[in-house]
């Protein structure tokens, strides 16, 4: 009886030892394999905030870091900005209330005010007396269909986040290192 237990116990210990050796070998093999991989083609996207219909993202790729603003409309409603341009656009968007008040006081129909920001154009427009006031950001090229559309409130709320774009970009650059 004792002999059977001893033989059975040794078998259990041998099986456990064999499983341990196999698992150690497998782990060392998988670790050496993981070192063989190189991350060289990637896109990291930080979805910072959505204000109404407008989204703000910070996107890091292997060779660049961009601030992405977009509204409904896919690629035609998405702009890829350098952080410094995003900050400058945010500073202009912060003045949306001033332009709205100006349009309210005016008797003109189809009012438009444009502000050049680097290679971008911020257009404040409305119908008579501020009706249907909107803010549009687009490239200042003559023929471009790409633009992001904001309501007055969306523009004002998004302005602060865009003005922090350089800080957010620096954070992503510092923290995301493949």
Image (cartoon, rainbow, N blue to C red):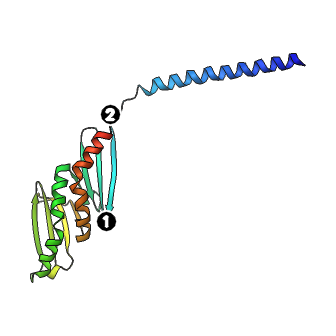
Compared to 128, does 55 lie above or below?
A: above
Compared to 111, does 156 lie above or below?
A: above
Q: Residue at x 61, y 20 (%)?
A: 21
Helix or strand or loop: what does disc 2 sit on? Answer: loop
Q: Residue at x 9, y 83 (%)?
A: 107
Q: Residues within 10 Å of mark 1 (few under 14, many from 20)?
A: few
Q: Quadrant of the C terminus?
A: top left
Q: Residue at x 23, y 66 (%)?
A: 156
- C-alpha separation, residue under disc 2 versus residue under disc 1: 33 Å
Does the rendering let one see residue 78? no
Q: Which mark is residue 40?
A: 2
Between 28 and 110, the residue placed more toward the observer is 28
Compared to 21, does 109 lie above or below?
A: below
Earlier residue among tags 2 and 1: 2
Residue 127: x and y, percent? 16, 79
- Residue bearing mark 1: 53
Residue 164: x and y, percent? 23, 53
């Amino acid at each position: 009886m004792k002999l059977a237990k001893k033989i059975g116990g040794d078998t259990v210990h041998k099986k456990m030892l064999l499983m341990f050796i196999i698992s150690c070998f497998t782990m060392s093999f998988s670790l050496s394999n993981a070192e063989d991989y190189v991350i060289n083609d990637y896109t990291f996207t930080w979805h910072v905030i959505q204000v109404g219909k407008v989204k703000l993202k910070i996107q890091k790729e292997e060779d660049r870091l961009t601030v992405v603003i977009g509204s409904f409309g896919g690629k035609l409603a998405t702009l890829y900005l350098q952080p410094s341009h995003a900050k400058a656009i945010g500073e202009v968007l912060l003045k949306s209330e001033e332009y709205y008040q100006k349009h309210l006081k005016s008797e003109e129909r189809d009012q438009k005010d444009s502000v050049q920001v680097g290679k971008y154009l911020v257009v404040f427009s409305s119908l008579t007396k501020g009706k249907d006031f909107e803010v549009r950001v687009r490239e200042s090229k003559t023929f471009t269909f790409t633009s992001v559309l904001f309501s007055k409130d969306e523009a004002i709320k998004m302005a602060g986040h865009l003005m922090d774009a350089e800080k957010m970009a620096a954070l992503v650059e510092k923290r995301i290192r493949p």
